[in-house]
Image (spheres, rainbow, N blue to C red):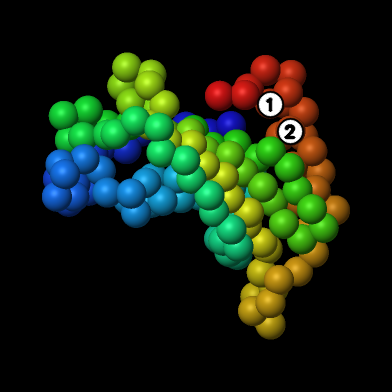
Amino acid sequence: MKQVSIRVRWADMDAYQHVNNAVYLNYLEEARDTAMVGLFGPEALDFVLAHVDIDFRSEVTQDDGEVTVLSRVVGYGRSSVRSREVVRKPDGTVAAEGGAVVVPRDTATGRSRQLTAAEIALIDAELTADQTAGHDF
């Protein structure tokens, strides 16, 4: 599991003076990218987003200052990795939670590829570590 702190910028606000719904996707992406690079190294940049979902729970405003976004890998398939992300306000309130599916990309063809045995071993180790630590957000 990885955690990032993100300062809420004026440009993140919409006409209602809260963080625009589309900006939350950037927040989730920043945490997910940090988690994926932490797991796979620079090769994680060869993964592409195939699916994303998000549930909005509580508004974030610029007065919140910053949010904390947690991301962790929760599973995988033959050629995909699933993650979950949570956005928390400074008081711990869940502002949003979501998930994603990323797919490894063959850099030569630009197409998806299967996960390698080494990548699966890294994911399995991460899942075991999270389970042992009791991480469930």
x 67%, y 18%: residue? 133
Residue 126 in which image quadrant: top right
Residue situated in front as seen by the camera: 42 or 15: 15
Residue 48 % position (x, y): 58, 64
| Amino acid residing under circle 2 | Leu
| Amino acid residing under circle 1 | Asp
Residue situated in front as seen by the camera: 39 or 136: 136
Q: Would you name the residue on which mark 1 appears?
A: 130
**Please, what secondary structure does the residue beneath circle 1 have?**
helix
x 73%, y 42%: residue? 75
Which residue appears farthest toward the right when viewing the image?
117
Residue 16 in which image quadrant: top left
Quadrant where the N terminus lies? Answer: top right
Res. 119 visible in picture: yes
Q: Would you name the residue on which mark 2 appears?
A: 127
Residue 78 % position (x, y): 82, 58
**Please, what secondary structure does the residue beneath circle 2 have?**
helix
**Rendered position, 121 above or below 79:** above
Quadrant where the C terminus lies? Answer: top right
Residue 47 in which image quadrant: bottom right
